[in-house]
Amino acid sequence: MNFEFLPPELVALLGAGFWHAAIVFLRLAAMVAALPAISEEFVPTNVKLVVAIVFTLIVAPSVPTQATPNSLFLYGGLAISEAIIGLALGFGVRIFVLTLQTAGSIAAQSTSLSQAFGGIGAEPMPAIGSFLVFAGTAFAVMMGLHVKVAEFMIQSYQLFPVGQFPPASELTPWIVTRVSHSFSMSFALAAPFVITSVIYNFTLGFISRAMPQLMVSIIGAPVITFGGMFILMVASPMILMYWAEVFFGFFADPTGGAR
């Protein structure tokens, strides 16, 4: 059933470019809602809206012109499909932040720092997780995250044309691959802390067996705590460099398999 909800006078007043930008905005607003550094809880909603509008002004002239929807049903279908595509693409970028969070949680649990401090995000994070997330996000912004995101948004229209729902047979394996890669990468980033924890516990167990009268936990707790902080100081630049390499590699090949 056709609903002529756009009066010809309004179309003539605003022009076809307005409706083209409005359709592009549907996808980009959903992506902005999941992007690192922009979608954080402490970022005001009006700032997120302005960022979405700015990205729309950048991306709209670079993508094929969209026809003006001539029915309420058509515009509603576009809103649903574009929002799904935007959220899926935003999730593909956002999951790299979740990778740092998971790596920080693994490292903190391994070095007895899981309850030292709390984060300011929506979910509580240990100190190492908060440090890695904020450092990684700041590093990505300094390396031109906004430029890569704009290019990614333009490229998304070649991957997913407007108005076409992404096939579940292609979208589901892609999401599963990203999640699987996220967990494997998290463990790889936290490997120095895990290895240190294993060595520490083996050493502590050996000392405890050799000298039962010694309160090894009193001596060992400060050692593993300061050891974890030292590893964080030394290894964090390499961790962030590797993470940034994989992160920006995703923008170059978003449909490729996990490395």
Image (cartoon, helix red, strand yellow):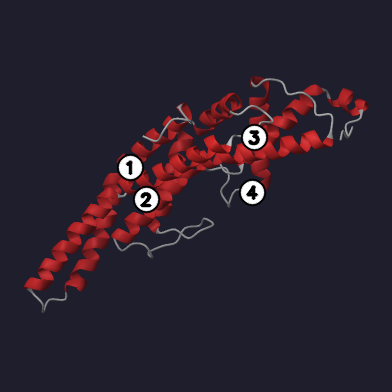
User: Could you tell me how far apart the alpha carbons at marks 1 and 4 are, in whole angstroms?
Assistant: 30 Å
- Disc 4 marks which amino acid? Pro
> Is the C-beta separation of discs 2 and 1 under 8 Å?
yes
The label number, if any, that marks residue 239 in the structure image: 1
Disc 2 or disc 1, which is closer to the eye?
2
Label 4 residue SS: loop
Q: Residue 176 carries which label?
A: none
For label 2, count other residues whose C-alpha is less than 10 Å away and answer few (under 14), some (14-19) or many (20+): many
**Rendering quarter of residue 65:** top right
Whole-Å distance between the Cαs marked 2 and 3? 33 Å
Q: Can residue 147 be seen in this view?
A: yes
**Which circle's residue, 1 or 4, is located before the other in the chain?**
4
Tell me how far mark 1 sits from mark 3, CA to CA.
37 Å
- Nearer the N terminus, badge 3 or badge 4? 4
Badge 1 or badge 3: first in the primary sequence:
3
Q: What residue type is labelled 1?
A: Ile
Q: Name the residue under label 3.
A: 165
Q: Residue at x 54, y 37 (%)?
A: 169
Which quarter of the figure is the N terminus placed in?
A: top right
Quadrant position of residue 225:
bottom left
Mark 1 and mark 3 in contact? Answer it, CB < 8 Å.
Answer: no
Q: Could you tell me which residue is drawn at 46 percent across and 34 percent down?
A: 142
Say which residue label 4 marks. Answer: 44
Say which residue label 2 marks.
103
Q: Earlier in the sequence, mark 2 or mark 3?
A: 2
* In this rendering, position of residue 24 left or right of residue 19: left
Q: Which residue type carries mark 2?
A: Ala
Q: How far apart are marks 2 and 1 (CA)?
A: 10 Å
Tell me whether circle 2 and circle 3 mark residues in contact (CB < 8 Å).
no
Considering only vertical position in the picture, is 16 above or below 177? above
Location of residue 106 with respect to 91 vertically, above or below: below
